[in-house]
Amino acid sequence: MTAIYALPDHEVVTKLIPGIAQTCLETEAAVARIRATPGMIPVAIDPETDSSGTGKVLWADIGTYPLREWQQVFTISTLAWRGAIGDAFATDFSILQDDRILADPIEPSGFLFHISRCGSTLTGKALARSPRHLVINQGAPLQRGFWATITHDWAQEVEPSAENLKAFRNLVLAMTRRRLPEEERAFIKFISWNTLYMDFALRAFPQMPALFLYREPVEVIASVLRETSAVVWAKGRPQAGFLSGLDWRATEAMSEVEYLAHCFARYLGFAAQMKDRVGLLNYVDIKPENFAAILARGLDFRPEEDELALMLEQFRYHSKDDNDTQQFRSDSAEKRGSIPAQDQALVARICGGLMKKLNRSPANLFPRSRYLASAGQSG
């Protein structure tokens, strides 16, 4: 059974919140409802076209519930299970052009892009430990729905038009509205393949500090094979052509190792091209003793000692355990050992040169690190 975080966001949300997609509001009514309801945020985007030829934005009132889960979809799932989601409805995608949907938004202080299973969840959840931080960990509308809508399910390239950039900016700001009075800063951690849209996202937010986190691809692939991902769901579908840079039809017959290696090589290559705009961070350097430097060098953020101490507590726990019951343990060697030697060699041929390029880049936060494979933290 595919995990909910690997499925298209609108499919998950429409099952968690029955009737949300059928309750359609016109723009004026929706704007009034959004502005009158402090907990109302976008929770998914359905890219299927409606009578106006666009997709739909799905909205739900999550009240003052803090976003602490390792993915936003689990926040929605938790609230749905408790019966704690308030009003919910759908609007035309075009509502993202209307600035009136922005009610006390917090301008984000940093974007986190990543290769997957590389410490990004750890970093996002550490930031979320502070009650002063609003952290969107892989926000559902930013995962697939937005991009599928503006590319017509990957039938065309993303166009960084003024309209598309405004839709993206307003979507992000609608998600980062202040729902709790103590919230001062917002951070966005994207799903891994959104790395391929780094340039687009940073055009919408030109002053935004940004990080790209990455890890030895063999270890990432071992983790994905064990736990699945949205990238695996896309294999053999049109989206796979965009993710891998190959003919999407050819991906269906590929082994998952080869397919994932091509996808991750695309991410690494895009990150290498963004070296003057995005800081680079290898998984092996994500350690408690480095965290203050990571925040300062990568996100231009220097928290007070008490807030830093609060965030460092996350390093004690497995990042995908939202209950803080599972202690962290390094499993890098175990992951490498689970991939056959011939597959490791294949991944090295596809990704090895790009890994060296990122490790040696002047944009790397720790360019003199030796990148010992046994070091690092889980995320």
Image (cartoon, rainbow, N blue to C red):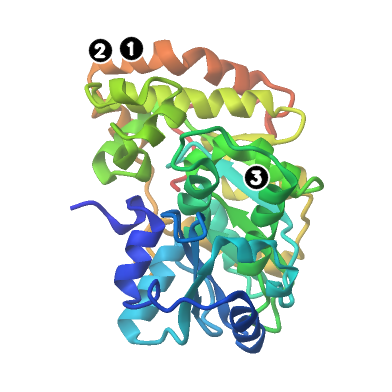
Q: Secondary structure at mark 1?
A: helix
Helix, strand or loop at label 2? It is helix
The local secondary structure at tag 3 comes to: helix
Q: Measure how far apart labels 3 and 2 are at the Cα level.
A: 35 Å
**Looking at the rendering, which quadrant does residue 367 occupy?**
top right
Residue at label 3? Answer: 290
Q: Is residue 325 above or below residue 153?
A: below
Q: Does residue 371 appear in the picture of this structure?
A: no
| Residue bearing mark 1 | 345
Q: Amino acid at mark 2?
A: Gln
Labels 1 and 2 touching (C-beta < 8 A)? yes
Residue 111 in the figure: left or right of residue 44:
right
Instruction: Give the residue type at disc 1.
Output: Ala
In the rendered structure, the answer to whether residue 197 lies left or right of residue 323 reads: right
Asked if 273 appears above or below 18 in the picture, the reply is above
Name the residue located 35 percent from the left edge and 79 percent from the top edge: 80
In-front residue for pair 221/167: 167
What residue is shown at x 74% (from left), y 42% (from top)?
203
| Quarter location, residue 276 | top right
Asked whether, in this view, residue 178 is left or right of residue 143, the answer is: right
Q: Position of residue 336 (x, y in %)?
A: 31, 27
The residue singled out by tag 2 in the image is: 342
Q: Amino acid at mark 3?
A: Asn
C-alpha gap between disc 1 and disc 3: 31 Å
The spot of residue 181 in percent (x, y) is 70, 84
Circle 3 residues within 10 Å: few <14, some 14–19, many ≥20: few
Q: Residue furthest front?
A: 51
For marks 3 and 2 on the same chain, the one whose residue lies earlier in the sequence: 3
* Label 1 vs label 3, nearer the camera: 1
Percent position (x, y) of residue 150?
55, 46
Considering only order in the chain, which callout, 3 or 1, is on the residue closer to the N terminus? 3
